[in-house]
Image (spheres, helix red, strand yellow):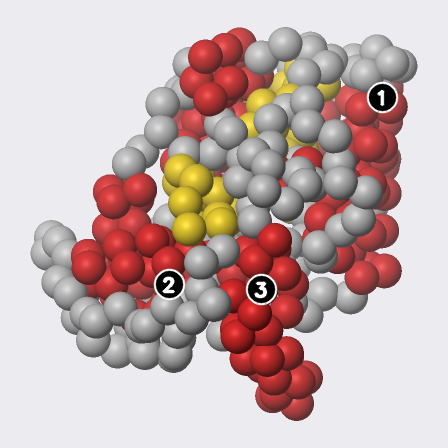
Amino acid sequence: MRALVTGGTGFVGGALVRALVAGGAHVRVLARPTSQTEALEALGVEIVRGDILVRASIEAALEGCDTLFHAAALYDLWGLDEAELLATETEGTRNAMAAALAVGVAKVVYTSTAVCIGEAKGHVATETTAHRGYFLSSYEKAKYAAEQVAFTYVEKGVPLICVQPAAIYGPGDRKPTGRFIISLLNGRVPALFPGWVSLVYIDDAARGHVLAAENGRVGERYILAGTVGKLTQLGRLVCRLAGCWSPPTIPAPLAAPYAFGGEALSRLTRRPPVLSWETYRLAAHGFRADGSRATAELGLTYTTQEEGLMQAINWYWAQRLLRRRPACIRDP
């Protein structure tokens, strides 16, 4: 395989690059001029400077490649400019699909998200679930629009396979899930509430992309979700692994003022809140996604949540992001 990866300098794209290199693929990464690429170059990855908002740069980078992994995206549930987010997701995706069509690659794997499936409250999302008709976050809205753009190119002949990861966690994660774990272990989460979350370990998400290119069917979606559970269960497991006390549980509505107040404070400090309003809305509504199709059709196996969380906690400790040494630390 000769693959171009957009977003290869990011959390998900970087893991995907490592998985491709480990599998013997020749990997090229489209990186902006300001992006740090030393770690990728050390893996033998070819770097091409460009931008997903410039279609010509994607086309140039695709020359000689048979597979495109379009993983570039903005992601957070706090602090992003909605207009910039929408433009980056939709126009970047349109440019990537148009470039793939012009060059004529054999496969395109597009990184969407299980969040944009938009299952109704109380339901579990599958690849065929109809969207509820309203959005819980700007990120969901932008990724939903971008996925619609991507699938219009299937009709034009782009051999598109779409992967829809749940909330990705693991070593390297500093986004909402990672920030929650760090805040929890540093005693900054005063209480837990019983919202639903779906998770997938970073290495599983990366393998899911590779397997989608190898075994996925063109025009299909594949949810990547290893675990589905309540936020209270996740918090208690993290605390048990770290050897610390778990915060008390409160009804979900009581967490709303904390999220709202945290947002107001963050607008002044420019630091992420412990619980953003959009994270609260998503968890309180319920984010449940069924990742079994990826196992049945792609051959993806999932890391246990306990093992994945231990790897994440070890990484946070190694990065000096935790105040207290967790009980599950594995010394080298």
The residue at which mark 1 appears reads as 153
Tell me what residue is drawn at x 61 percent, y 84 percent.
261
Tell me what residue is drawn at x 58 percent, y 42 percent.
122
Can you say whether 288 is above or below 280 in the image?
A: above
Task: Identify the mark nearer the N-term, 2 or 1.
Answer: 1
Task: Identify the mark nearer the N-term, 2 or 3.
Answer: 2
Q: Depth check: give the residue in front, 126 or 51.
A: 126
Q: Can residue 203 be seen here?
A: yes
Q: On the picture, is 68 further left or further right than 210?
A: right
The residue at which mark 3 appears reads as 280
Tell me what residue is drawn at x 56 percent, y 49 percent.
286
The residue at which mark 2 appears reads as 181
Mark toward the viewer: 2 or 3: 3
Look at label 3 and name its amino acid.
Tyr
Look at label 1 and name its amino acid.
Tyr
Look at label 2 and name its amino acid.
Ile
Q: How many numbered discs sit on the rendered protein?
A: 3
Q: On the picture, is 325 further left or further right than 14?
A: left
Mark toward the viewer: 2 or 1: 2
- Alpha carbons under labels 2 and 3: distance apart: 15 Å
Report if the CB atoms under discs 2 and 3 are less than 8 Å apart: no
Can you say whether 96 is above or below 307 in the image?
A: above
Q: Residue 57: name its quadrant.
A: top right
Q: Residue 113: name its quadrant.
A: top right
Q: Can residue 72 be seen here?
A: no
Where is residue 29? Give x, y as percent. Answer: 60, 37
